[in-house]
Image (spheres, grey):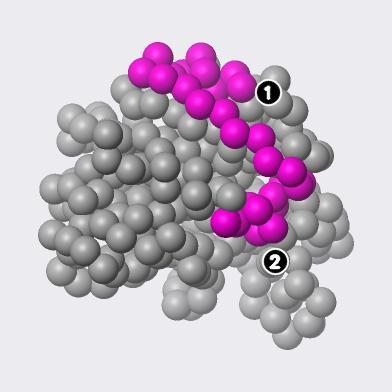
Amino acid sequence: MALSTESSWLHRHPTKAPPRLRLLCLPHAGGSASFFHGWGGAVGDDVELLAARYPGRQERIAEDPLDSLEALADALADELGPQLDLPLAVFGHSMGASVGYELALRLKERYGTGPEVLMVSGRKPPHLLTPRTAAFGGDAALIAQVRRLGGTDARLLDDPALRELVLPAIRADFAAVARYPARPGVPLDCPVVAYLGADDPDISTAEIWDWERLAPQGFGLRVMSGGHFYLVDRREELLLDIRSRLAPR
């Protein structure tokens, strides 16, 4: 069953075949649904891809961005409730991984069912998080942090007009990350798969492996070449791995 209407929170990529399950993709800090352009169909002809649209960017540029990961997870849980007629998988990169974790807890609490699998990319588990304070400094500190991590969004900061448009959402996202301190992790009722760029400047393999503590239903880890945004250059390799994990058993 496909989504009957387009949601302000969810951009749907139609499937070639009747959908068997849905994959929700959650962007990084400063990211948008368009980051996952081209993923639709690449993870399976019968996998309906949903890309989260955070407020304050692209189609929702006129809206105030949210500066709380919990608020993002709450809103997405509200949106996803009617869509749980099909199994749901969740992929989140960087900030999106923490949003995905909080979302998984909320889906289980509210609806009695969580995702089939949570895929976390480039992000420490909740009990190992360390604060980032760039959001509370000036524009220069925030831009420097975005450039340090890399990614396609950094190019927008070269154009003064575009920079003025995108900085509020970037600042709100980095503030949300900073306000999400380390906390004891709650084990999940679904398997967890972690992905990491081997040269990520902020996360080691040992640290991302610690997601295993929250995954009594099963844990997998895939390390690929590249930095924090390894998934740009290694996109085909990543999508092939995700497709294999979502294939019918």
Compared with 156, 98 (above or below) is above
Residue shown at 18%/47% (left/top)?
86
- Point out residue 66 in the picture as x, y percentages from the top left corner: 50, 56
Residue shown at 60%/44% (left/top)?
94
Front-most of residues 123 and 18? 18
Quarter of the C terminus within the rendering: top left
Asked whether residue 171 is drawn in magenta, I would say: no
- Point out residue 111 in the picture as x, y percentages from the top left corner: 18, 36
- Looking at the rendering, the stretch of residues picked out in magenta corresponds to 209-236
Q: Is residue 149 left or right of residue 58?
A: right
Q: Which quarter of the picture shows residue 233?
A: bottom right
C-alpha separation, residue under disc 1 versus residue under disc 2: 25 Å
Q: Which quarter of the picture shows residue 155?
A: bottom right
Residue shown at 47%/22% (left/top)?
219
Asked whether residue 226 is drawn in magenta, I would say: yes
Residue shown at 31%/37% (left/top)?
115
Q: Inspect the image, locate mark 1, and give the three-letter code of the amino acid beneath it.
A: Glu
Front-most of residues 150 and 199? 199
Q: Is residue 153 left or right of residue 190?
A: right
Compared with 184, 51 (above or below) is below
**Which residue is labeled 2 in the image?**
152
Find numbered disc 2 in the image and state the secondary structure of the residue it sits on: helix
Quarter of the N terminus within the rendering: bottom left
Front-most of residues 29 and 141? 29
Using the image, tell me which numbered label, if any, was put on residue 207. Answer: 1
* Disc 2: CA contacts within 10 A as few (<14), some (14-19) or many (>=20): few
